[in-house]
Amino acid sequence: MDTPLPNADPASWATRFAVEQTRRAHAEAALTAAEATSRVLEQQLAAATRQTHQLAEQKRFFETILAHLPKAVAVLDADFRYVFINPAAEPDPVIRQWLVGKTNLQACQRRHYPAHIAQQRQRAFNEARQQQREVTWEETLSQGSQPRQWLRRFRPVLHPDGALQFMIHSGLDITARHAAEQRQRQSEALMREQQAFTRLVMDTLPNKVYVAAVDGTVSFANAAYAAARQEAVPASGSETHGSEVPEPFRDVAAWDQQVRATQQPFQVEQTLAVLPAGTRYLQVDKRPLVRGNGAVEVLTIETDITALKVAQQAAEANACAKEVFLSRMSHEIRTPLNGVLGMATLLAKTELTSAQHEYLHTMQRAGQHLVALVNDVLDMAKITTQPLSFEEKPFDVAFTLQGAQQLMAALAEEKGLPLLLTAAPVADSHVLGDAYRLHQVLLNLLSNAIKFTEQGHLELGMDVVEDTRSTLTLRFWVTDTGIGIAPPHQQAIFEAFTQVSSAQDRLRGGGVGLGLAISQQVVRQMGGELEVRSALEQGSTFFFTLSFPRATVAPVPPVAEQITYPELRGLRVLLAEDNLVNQWLATVMLEHWGVQVDAVDNGPQALARLQEQAYDVAILDIQMPGLTGLEVTRAIRQHAVAARAQVPILALTANAFQADRESYLAAGMSACLTKPFVEAELCRLLGQLRRVPPAT
């Protein structure tokens, strides 16, 4: 408490007291205000401290993120000096610390980058600052053994007034992506090259190639197709519509539908009338193309086969002309030859002197040789035009071998040559095959051996090469001690119309060089190869190997028909033959057997007799004036009277082709007899035909 001054005026004291109270009140108010201000400052300081702490935390947070980014990040100031570098940009912490405050040029020099790298970065920095936008570029850095490709970015951070505050520099290693892009570019370039090559190939093809989409439109076509658009060649069924669609186009549309429906390839030959070129022939191949979405398109390849077709037609015409010529030649030779050999047969039945018998024997052998020659020519013609047909029947191969030896032994004996048979034993010699063709080859080889051997002997042999449960493989050979063949000529003898020595062959009565050529072709078509081992004056051996399937059943031996001439006595026969010599010859033979013969020399007469009279058998020549034997046969088979319509008809023909025989039988004839015929064969066929029951 303040002590009042002594002797003070009370009023003065009161005034002074009031002043003092006022000062005290002001002081207390100031103190209170100061305390309030202090508390505010303390709060502000605490807030600032917290904010500083938060900013530090945020800084550590962002630095941590930047430090762990796989992407290189650096912060640059306005002078292009480093402020911050993350580990992805520089893994070495010492270098990172050194870089802070350094310029771009200093950093590039420290890392030994080429000068153009620093220059490129400086240009990009200036561009980003001036244009205030992000700038991107790529750069290649030599790091280690392999260069690395980097994608760089400068992104400016600006003050509110537009001035540059910081520049964010980021980098991404795009080496793998760059390599992938390079591979992609190379792959695309290769694909383009392949597509161009494929297109070149497709456009070079003479074939028209195109693809028809599901709606029928052409989605792909090559140059040949485009060039042919003006021709009448169908491309797809959708290209023309309505009732006026040409038939070829309608066919193509139907074919496309078939391929889409079945998803199977389709091939057809198409004939088109294209003006002014004329008829064109196309081979059309269609194949389904199943796309990834399941849609089925149709790939079409059209090949112009006009030239091939024309050549084929010409070849067929030539073959037909050749066959007609050979048939006519055969007819012209066989017809008079039939008269010659037939007369020789009749002459042999008369009383002859020994000299006359020798003359007759020579004439018969010459005629038989001529028949063999004609048969060889026809066989060779058949072989060169088409493959031979082979039977697959059970037969005894040992029996066939023995039959060939027995048949040729007499001919060999005439020259004083023994014909030996050497056959290895076979437990079961029953096989499947064509006994006739095997017999034909063996006879050809034996005939040649006899022809070219003057002394010594001949041998026909068979060895077993392999004997299994399913097959029997045999080696056949014919050996002679004749003149032999020089090695240079050994292959030529298998060619048609080829002989080693034509002069020698003529002296020996040789043919035209067809026997071995025919035998070689027959053996080849049976799966073997005819070969020869020979030397001049040391004989020859011809051999071949064939495999035969085993026969499951033994062959049934043929039963020889016992037909005697008395059985034919009283038989009524119509004989239609325009060649008077052959007509007279056949009449004499038939009447000698007691057959009643009614002979005519043309087709109309033959048909009239068959319609008017009943005959047991009719013998019809194929080629006759007025009507052919085939025409007479077809006509009489239509007769209202069954007995007339079903008369047995024997075709008498000089045509020796199998196709001719088949056509005669198809026309209704009962059997065929080829000129020149032997008396026994005519007798056998008449005996068969008279036993044929009437057709029902």
Image (cartoon, rainbow, N blue to C red):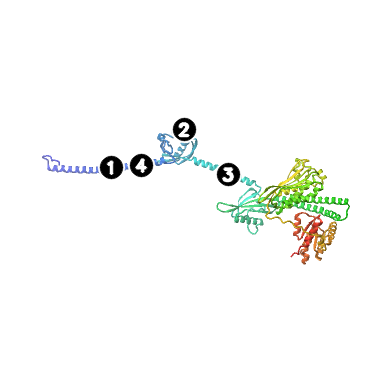
The numbered mark, 1 or 4, whose residue comes first in the sequence reads: 1
Q: Are marks 1 and 4 in contact (CB under 8 Å)?
A: no
Quarter of the figure that contains the N terminus: top left
Q: Identify the mark nearer the N-term, 3 or 2.
A: 2
Instruction: Please tell me whether mark 1 or mark 2 is closer to you in this view.
Output: 2
Q: Element at badge 3?
A: helix
Residue behind mark 2: 112
Element type where label 1 sits in the image:
helix
Disc 1 marks which residue?
A: 42
- In percent of width and height, residue 598 lies at 84, 62
CA separation in Å, label 4 and label 3 = 57 Å
Instruction: Name the foreground residue: 363 vs 83.
Output: 363
- The amino acid on which the numbered mark 3 sits, given as a three-letter code, is Arg
Whichever of labels 1 and 2 marks the residue nearer the N terminus, that label is: 1
Q: Position of residue 71 (x, y in %)?
A: 44, 41
Q: What residue is pinned by disc 4?
A: 57
Q: Image height check: is 644 above or below 524?
A: below
Q: CA distance from mark 1 to mark 4?
A: 22 Å
Residue type at mark 2 is His
In this rendering, position of residue 22 left or right of residue 55: left
Place of residue 510 in the rendered image (x, y in percent of width and height, measured from the top left): 80, 46
Task: Return the residue at label 3.
Answer: 192
Q: Amino acid at mark 4?
A: Glu
Query: In terms of sequence position, does the residue under pointer 2 or pointer 4 come before the other?
Result: 4
**C-alpha distance separating marks 3 and 2:** 41 Å
Quadrant holding the C terminus: bottom right
Give the image quarter of residue 28.
top left
Residue 536, horizontal then vertical, whole percent: 77, 40
